[in-house]
Amino acid sequence: MTSRIRVEENGPLLEITFDHPPAHAFDQQACRDLDAAFGRLCDAPGLRCGIVTATGDRIFSAGWDLKAVAAGDRGEDFGPNGFMGLRRQFTRPVIAAVNGLAVGGGFEFALHAHMVVCAPESEFGLPELQRGFLPEAGGLWRVFRRLPRSIANELLLTGRRLTAEEGLRLGFVNRIVPRAALMDAAREMALRVAASAPLAVEALLEIAREAEVLPDAQAFALFQAGLPAHRRMRGSADYYEGPRAFAEKRPPRWTGS
């Protein structure tokens, strides 16, 4: 069976492309394939950042394959990290390069990504309530973390779509670029990520994830108690390479150790 995603290493970047036109909808196997790609991103020593995009010029992803569900495919064996891997705790940053409509799981994925670059025509929507269910792959609460509460409520309760310009204004979208320049912009951003100290990046993602919803006092206590990736960073050679490179006026040489 042909996979619905394509995966390609591009230097320190892992580029993942949804390739099941026209809607790039996800069934059980596609979810497992996508999560396997995320596992590769997080485990391969030479990879520093992931970019996720889709083929075509209209749709990023419509999420769950409702046509398959309507035809009788009611299974939900999406793999250990759930639908589209959206339960996975990323140890490497992921950029969503959104080329068009991102609805349902497509929007849920963009909400889970660390950064979003999109084409001007992109729109984001959570139409689940209008179809009789909820966005249960994380979008239900992540949309409240990434957008103002009143906007999140409107998107959920009415099914209205968020435009690219509105997403940029509200801080959900990092950049809007012409569709033809989408991957170039995403790669430029990803390569800047890749230039940062890899263990520091992993520690940042860990601390941000664990402390995001904590009051300051609890966040400081958690930080001071130590978290695994943070401890690895503090005990690494890279922890001292940065100051040495600064003092010697040269680019740092990160080893990830």
Image: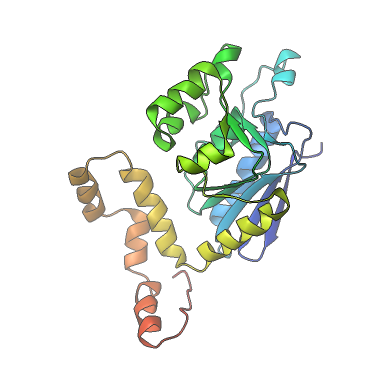
- Tell me the quarter of the image containing the N terminus: top right
At 46% from the left and 31% from the top, the residue drawn is 143
In the rendered view, tell whether residue 105 sits above or below residue 198: above
Image-based side of 144 in relation to 78, left or right: left
Residue 10 sits above or below residue 113 on the image: below
The residue at the point 40 percent across, 73 percent down is 238
Q: Please say whether residue 176 is visible from this viewpoint.
A: yes
Q: Relative to residue 255, is residue 174 depicted above or below?
A: above
Residue at 70%, 48% (x, y): give it.
Answer: 179
Q: Quadrant of the C terminus?
A: bottom left
Question: How many numbered marks does the figure carry?
Answer: 0
Quarter occupied by residue 66: top right
Residue at image point 64% right, 38% down: 122
Q: For the view shown, which residue lies furthest in the bottom direction?
A: 248
Residue nearest the viewer, comparing 250 with 80:
250
Give the image location of residue 93, x and y in percent.
Answer: 51, 53
Q: Quadrant of residue 121?
A: top right
- Name the one closer to the observer, 76 or 191: 191
Residue 111 point in image, percent of width and height: 51, 38
